[in-house]
Image: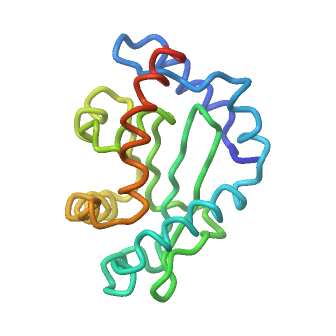
Amino acid sequence: MCSHTVGSVHASVARQAGSSSAGPRLPRPLALPFSLLPDTVCSHVIVNLLNQSLMVQLKQGELDFLQRRFLTVRVRDAGINIHLTVEGRKLRVATGHAADALIIEASVYDFLRLVGQQEDPDALVFQRRLVVQGDTELGLEVKSFLDGLDVDSLGLYRHLAPVLHRLLPVYRRLFS
């Protein structure tokens, strides 16, 4: 299943629910289909999208810091865990990720706000809505890469940004 740590994910969601700064959460009936998918399926979809979107950066070696290191992106309210690494000049689904070097965890809404550049990651960390655990050095390298990324040059982002701009207020009204 996409969530190997169901108990801890639900505990994190429960802690968030008590926080006045918590954003909207994906309702369980909508999250159920995602949580039934194996991690590898979720990971392959995202890795393929990222390989297409970050082709130039991968070829230039900008993600080489992920060589032989594991990153897990955990979407807590959807029960999705995306495991990735870099091999050669491509992102790959990480196998044997029991010793994840870095775990980045947030809700669907908060990740979408980050992708749409509508939220500051530091503010989400301060509010405990974005949790980063593990290898501090790797976390700083990921942050540095993302800070330097010209998202406007990414084809996928140019199409996604206007959709997110319209979608996120609706998402917030529906699921708050």
How was this image coloured? rainbow
Question: Which residue is at the front of the view, 132 or 51?
Answer: 51
Question: Which residue is at the front of the view, 4 or 50?
Answer: 50
Image position, residue 138 (x, y; %): 33, 64
Question: Which residue is at the front of the view, 63 or 173?
Answer: 173
Image position, residue 22 (x, y; %): 40, 19
Give residue 131's quadrant in the image. top left
Say left or right for 32 vs 121: right
Name the residue: 40% across, 72% down: 54
Image position, residue 105 (x, y; %): 47, 42
Q: Is residue 52 above or below residue 120?
A: below
> So how many labels did they put on this image?
0
Name the residue: 38% across, 46% down: 132
Name the residue: 35% across, 65% down: 154
Image position, residue 24 (x, y; %): 48, 21
Question: Which residue is at the front of the view, 107 or 112?
Answer: 112
Say left or right for 168 vs 35: left
Q: Is residue 157 above or below residue 141?
A: above
Name the residue: 52% across, 60% down: 100
Give residue 49's quadrant in the image. bottom right
